[in-house]
Amino acid sequence: MVNYKDLGLVNTREMFAKAIEGKYAVPAFNFNNMEQMQAIISACVEAGSPVILQVSSGARKYANQTLLRYMAQGAVEYAKELGKNIPIALHLDHGNSFELCKSCIDMGFSSVMIDGSHLPYDENVALTKQVVEYAHQFDVTVEGELGVLAGVEDEVSAEVAHYTRPEEVVDFVTKTGVDSLAISIGTSHGANKFKPEQCTRNEDGILVPPPLRFDILAEIEKQIPGFPIVLHGSSSVPQEYVKIINENGGALKDAVGIPEEQLRKAAESAVCKINIDSDGRLAMTAAVRTVFNQNPAEFDPRKYLGPARDELKKLYMHKCVNVLGSAGKVE
Ligand code: G3H
Ligand code: 13P
Ligand code: ZN
């Protein structure tokens, strides 16, 4: 049993309180490997931003749970070495069982998500409450979810989305005791967030997605004023990356994300955690494909993972400075 406090990590409570007060959102970036971790930490140190290092169960399987834990511990030391002791939370993304959440808490995670959003309401409440009761004994914070996002990933998949029902949120947060609530207002996981028929096209033929449901967000905020809200599926799918990927041998069709100005607007509300994974995947893929296309003889991993890491850092800096507004919030 390891307590996250002994690793130099923090839970999300104070981070979120400051983010709501300061009208910004804390970035939650997923990581699976060393280059992603380096990019996240170096970007957030340079930007002076708090950060949530996010680990999915797929990432745990891919990278090994013990290694990931030590990498997060290393991230704290790495940030100090780079010159800033930024608050770093280690968070389980889309935990799907009590056992998985418990295992992460026991291994030093400072925050967990229990995603019961696909369950009938009462089962979601019961499961989330069970995780909260365990987590709070160790001052670990818990994110629950109401409403279903569309999108398909390794561990998360839903054919049809349904928006969060504002009339359920008071009951859910009261009965479960969660510290933050992920909601569904039109974001979606992955790089193809909407079907082309759900979008319009601008004059350049680029897909324009339907706007987020800020009316539902406002209604939720009215029900639970000041309560920390989380947005999943918040990649913007930069079209520059999609173009580079496709011009260098890739085949991404109809990739579309959430416009950054809508995320900026959300960050100014009680939305205090914004999850971004796919944009990082696109940045890395664009950089790696470019290297291989320009130099097919290259076979030193540092020569393609290095540029991927640099591009990723640039992307994360941009998110902190221009989208989430979290830059400069750490003295
Ligand atoms: O929302 C899920 C994250 O993007 C993680 O995806 O399950 O493929 O690691 P993953
Ligand atoms: P994206 O696929 O939009 O990056 O969302 C990531 C996410 O929600 C992780 O939980
Ligand atoms: Zn998610």
Image: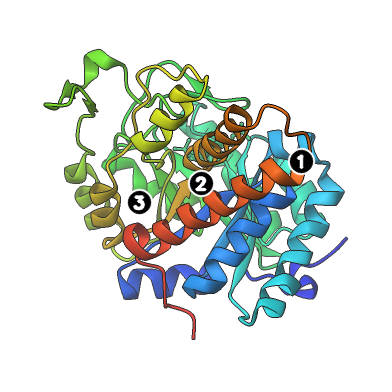
Seen at 24% across and 48% down, the residue is 262
Seen at 70% across and 33% down, the residue is 58
Q: Earlier in the sequence, mark 1 or mark 3?
A: 3
Find the distance from the CA under tag 1 to the CA under tag 3. 50 Å
In the displayed structure, 299 sits above or below 280; it is: above
Find the distance from the CA under tag 2 to the CA under tag 1. 39 Å
Query: CB at mark 1 closer than 8 A to ligand 1?
Result: no
In the shown orientation, is residue 126 left or right of residue 187? Answer: right
Kind of residue indicated by mark 3:
Val
Find the distance from the CA under tag 3 to the CA under tag 2. 13 Å
Q: Is residue 32 visible?
A: no
* Residue 269 in picture, x, y percent from top left: 27, 61
Kind of residue indicated by mark 2:
Gly
Residue position marked by numbered label 3 in the rendering: 170
Q: Which mark is residue 144?
A: 2
In the shown orientation, is residue 216 left or right of residue 122? Answer: left
Instruction: Tell me which corner region of the image, top left, top right, bottom left or bottom right, holds residue 308.
Output: top right
Say what secondary structure mark 3 lies in: helix
* Residue 104 in picture, x, y percent from top left: 76, 50
